[in-house]
């Protein structure tokens, strides 16, 4: 009997767990139900600016502080993004209006900013900083209303609404600085359906703010910390003079509105984009162009190859064939190992590691598991996946190294585990030193850096060694033809067979397929936008893989036809040609779209861009290399070699 009770208990627990998981909207993020008068905590995330690219924590500026400051424990992604989530003194209760309340200090004792603090505040206003707050994990947004280019009659009726993330710290008029010292919070709630006897529960579904600048004299405050706002027309803004002390009051008001938006779709507001149609159009355009070109290339290559193979395999024309030029002539040298096989296999191993990591991250994000509501999840997942994909990177690198007649597998494994990550860590460390110097929250704290190093040497390195060991022990790739003892002389090559011309030619198609998506990715990274179009991104990634493979095959075919058998390194370099165009695009974006003028923000931009370009080159180079290698093995297996 007791055994049966135990089994029943297990079944009940399982059913309860299943019921809980059904009510989740994003794995790991559960809705919070509030009753009327329940406190809704407002937390600060950070201050950001697209002009300086340096995030700062909220209390780096002299805002009102609560009696006890508590920071939220953060995941790896949040720390790397520069988020420092902290409590604030705003007192907000569910469905309770507040007309106007003084945030800190009493009305007869305003906040006094020292000359130093005033200077810092003015500096941040000049640098165009935004303040980011969250309520129930929902970021604050400023509503922007504007008229679209519609007909005159429609203009009167309808305005287009877009949302700006965070709110502006202040604004400038001429050479004067004005601070937004009054915040009007507008929170939207969704009333949940409950039984009649139960009390109503509410869920927060939108968090807006209208920032205002109101002079101290115009804010009429009483002894109970309540205040009355002046008429909109007659009030003067609160100026911050950086040359002297400034007196001001921080105030806020709270307004609640009921909304039809369900909790599950509350993020849709933040992710609305004015140009989804343009996006769809450009993606479809890319898909059509790439598949059209791919189809043409495939047809040409297949027809030419069939003709070649038929000619080479004709028994009676052996004499003529020997005199002809073509790819069959280099059969005795085509699989001759290249120079520096260890470095080549190490780079390709890192490329495989990146490929697996990017594929899984995009796929999981496409399924909605890494939504913006789980802050920092994307970066944390990417870091851990890169570490664990070391097994595959090591395996492929080890097997290729053995195929290329390599013997020092331990050195090869160490090279694979440290070459690319070492470069990334080195560049990030140098950039981090500059960010530290600026006291920005974007600087990775020392303990986090030690943790990352421990992950690298404690997880990634052993896994790469493990994969490399099994890859090196496995049978090497089977090459269909034997390599001659004496290398064949390579004829003089035409100008268009030059490596750099090849890089320029090979990069156009893959870059053309993805450069629209690149604009959105750059906006997300450098202009604090949310990136959520992972369905599009997955499609673009597939197109990129297809176009890289095809271009690589075409280039290696031309090279072998020109009797140049040194294709190993060249294929890897040429396939990554689109990374060169990404670099040019990054420079164009910097000049045209961003407002960066100072040295350190520029250094950060180009430092991180260099990392992106390097990673992209490894990724596309690896895709192209393996496509070309499979192609070369296929065509030489199809011809009869005496």
Image (tube, rainbow, N blue to C red):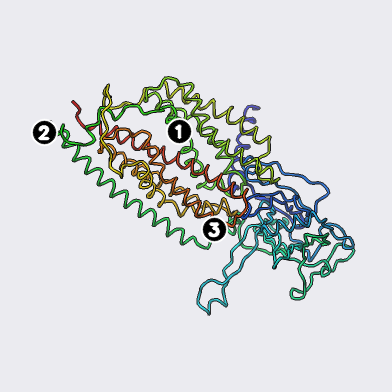
**Numbered disc 3: secondary structure:** loop
- The 10 Å Cα crowd at callout 1, few under 14, some 14 to 19, many 20 or more, is many
**Mark 1 or mark 2: whose residue is earlier in sequence:** 2
Extreme left residue here?
316
**Numbered disc 1: secondary structure:** helix
Q: Is residue 209 left or right of residue 261?
A: right
The circle drawn on residue 575 is none
**Mark 3 or mark 2: whose residue is earlier in sequence:** 2
Q: Is residue 354 above or below residue 140?
A: above
Q: Contact, CB < 8 Å: mark 1 with mark 3? A: no
- The 10 Å Cα crowd at callout 2, few under 14, some 14 to 19, many 20 or more, is few
The C terminus - image quarter = top left
What residue is at 40 percent from the left and 39 percent from the top?
Answer: 573
Query: What is the C-alpha distance between the residues marked 1 and 2?
Result: 43 Å
Residue at image mark 1: 347
Q: Is residue 462 above or below residue 232?
A: above
Residue at image mark 3: 593
Q: Is residue 514 left or right of residue 88?
A: left
Residue at image mark 2: 317
Q: Position of residue 349 (x, y in %)?
A: 45, 32
């Amino acid at each position: 009997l007791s055994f049966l009770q135990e089994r029943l208990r297990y079944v009940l627990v399982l059913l309860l767990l299943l019921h809980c998981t059904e009510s989740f909207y994003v794995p790991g993020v559960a809705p919070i139900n509030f009753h009327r008068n329940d406190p809704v905590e407002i937390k600060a995330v950070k201050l950001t600016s697209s002009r300086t690219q340096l995030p700062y924590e909220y209390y780096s500026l002299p805002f009102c502080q609560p009696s006890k400051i508590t920071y939220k424990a953060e995941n790896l992604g949040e720390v790397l993004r520069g988020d420092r989530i902290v409590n604030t003194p705003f007192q907000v209760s569910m469905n309770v209006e507040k007309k106007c309340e003084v945030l800190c200090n009493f009305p007869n004792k305003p906040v006094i900013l020292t000359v130093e603090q005033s200077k810092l505040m003015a500096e941040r206003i000049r640098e165009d900083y935004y303040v980011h707050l969250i309520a129930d994990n929902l970021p604050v947004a400023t509503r922007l209303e504007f008229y679209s280019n519609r007909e005159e009659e429609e203009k009167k009726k309808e305005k287009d609404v877009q949302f700006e993330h965070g709110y502006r710290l202040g604004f400038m008029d001429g050479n004067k600085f004005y601070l937004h010292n009054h915040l009007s919070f507008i929170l939207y709630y969704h009333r949940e359906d409950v039984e009649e006897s139960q009390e109503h529960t509410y869920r927060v579904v939108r968090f807006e703010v209208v920032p205002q600048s109101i002079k101290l004299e115009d804010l009429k405050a009483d002894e109970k910390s309540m205040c009355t706002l002046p008429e909109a027309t007659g009030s003067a803004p609160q100026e911050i003079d950086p040359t002297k002390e400034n007196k001001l009051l921080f105030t806020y008001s709270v307004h609640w509105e009921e909304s039809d938006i369900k909790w599950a779709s509350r993020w849709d507001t933040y992710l609305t984009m004015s140009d989804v149609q343009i996006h769809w159009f450009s993606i479809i355009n890319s898909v059509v162009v790439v598949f059209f070109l791919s189809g043409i290339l495939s047809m040409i290559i297949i027809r030419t190859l069939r003709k070649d193979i038929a000619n080479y395999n004709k028994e009676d024309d052996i004499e003529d064939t020997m005199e002809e030029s073509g790819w069959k002539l280099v059969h005795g040298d085509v699989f001759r190992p290249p120079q520096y096989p260890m470095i080549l296999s190490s780079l390709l191993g890192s490329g495989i590691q990146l490929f697996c990591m990017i594929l899984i991250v995009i796929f999981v994000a496409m399924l909605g598991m890494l939504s913006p509501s789980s802050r920092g999840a994307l970066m944390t997942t990417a870091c851990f996946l890169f570490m664990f994909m070391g097994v595959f990177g090591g395996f492929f690198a080890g097997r290729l190294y053995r195929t290329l007649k390599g013997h020092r597998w331990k050195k090869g494994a160490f090279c694979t585990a440290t070459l690319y990550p070492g470069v990334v860590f080195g560049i990030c460390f140098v950039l981090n030193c500059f960010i530290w110097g600026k006291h920005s929250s974007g600087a990775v704290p020392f303990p986090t850096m030690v943790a990352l190093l421990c992950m690298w040497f404690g997880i990634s390195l052993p896994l790469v060694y493990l994969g490399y060991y099994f890859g090196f022990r496995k049978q090497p790739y089977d090459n269909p033809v034997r390599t001659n003892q004496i290398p064949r002389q390579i004829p003089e090559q035409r100008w268009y067979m030059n490596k750099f011309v090849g890089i320029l030619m090979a990069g156009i198609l893959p870059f053309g397929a993805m450069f629209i998506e690149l604009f959105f990715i750059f906006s997300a990274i450098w202009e604090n936008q949310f990136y959520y179009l992972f369905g599009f991104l997955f499609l673009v990634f597939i197109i990129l893989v297809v176009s890289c493979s095809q271009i690589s095959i075409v280039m290696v075919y031309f090279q072998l036809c020109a009797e140049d058998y040194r294709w190993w390194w060249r294929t890897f370099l040429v396939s990554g040609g689109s990374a060169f165009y990404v670099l040019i695009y990054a420079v164009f974006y910097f000049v045209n779209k961003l407002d960066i003028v100072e040295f350190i923000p520029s250094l950060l931009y180009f430092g991180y861009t260099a990392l992106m370009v390097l990673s992209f080159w490894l990724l596309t180079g690896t895709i192209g290399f393996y496509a070309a290698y499979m192609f070369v093995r296929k065509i030489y297996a199809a011809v009869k070699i005496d």
